[in-house]
Amino acid sequence: MRDQSPREGRDHDPATAVLVHGPALTDPDDIAQLRHLQDGEVPIVVPRELLVDFGPKEVTRVPDIIGLDEFDGLFTRFEHTAWRLETRRRYASDELTDTYAQFTRGEPVDWTGVDADWCAERREQVALGKRFERVRVVDRPPTTGQLYLLDNARRNSAVGEEIRNLWRDDADRVGLPAEDFWIFDSRLVALLDFDDTDNLVDVELITEPAAVLRYVRARDAALHHALPYKEFAAQLTAQEH
């Protein structure tokens, strides 16, 4: 390393940017591992101790907010696994559907043909070898919206998603966050932002490794304690009798 301290660029805001320089990374095997190198970026070698000793200790994080159209695009761009935690007691968008009306009238819900484009996209992605998984948190007793989603799991499973459920007291016991989010390929988190009327309004992208790791750990804990939805539904039915 030619310079043992990072230097702030003259044309950059010191509060938001730090420039470092050093020898270029030239080993072909190492470069091949940089799967997310962007156009125009050049890899350099920075000693680990430099980051510890001179890296910024306090950074004001500016949320990376995206719209719902851009969010939808994430579901075809990821490479391996998309995983979601659902923690809310209701979702306003569900209550606008014909299937929700059927469910609340006590009628058997016919999921045939519902959200055909969404189902087709899920099947296409699963056929490419990708995985979709969810853990849904349920209250005791469950809300109407949670019971509706337990029935909805039949539709999700039919298109290739793996659906599990977890009691809220168990989720609280293992310290799961009271947030809804997707994790894509264990490297990107999409944190879902709902308004006071339970409508999804926008999405925050999180890519900082330490922050992503916290959500990945929550995923591992949720998967360890959650039950497949059919087993959970049977357990719920047994408790009601």
Image: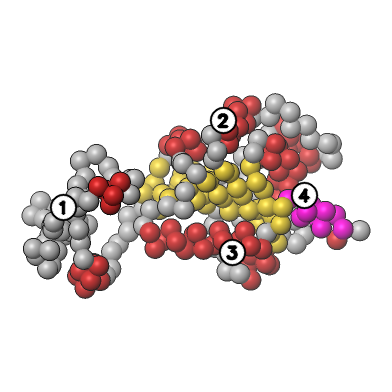
Height in image: 73 above or below 237? above
Mark 3 near mark 2, Cβ–Cβ under 8 Å? no
Element type where label 2 sits in the image = helix
Q: Distance between the residues labelled 3 and 1?
A: 40 Å
Please name the amino acid that badge 4 sits on.
Lys
Element type where label 3 sits in the image = helix
Name the image quarter holding the C terminus. bottom right
Residue range in magenta is 229-238
For discs 2 and 4, the disc positioned in front in the rendered view: 2
Name the image quarter holding the N terminus. bottom left
Mark carried by residue 24: 1
Q: Residues within 10 Å of mark 4 (few under 14, many from 20)?
A: some
For discs 4 and 1, the disc positioned in front in the rendered view: 1
First in sequence: mark 1 vs mark 2: 1
Q: Residues within 10 Å of mark 2 (few under 14, many from 20)?
A: some
Element type where label 4 sits in the image = helix
Q: Mark 4 points at which residue?
A: 230
First in sequence: mark 3 vs mark 2: 2
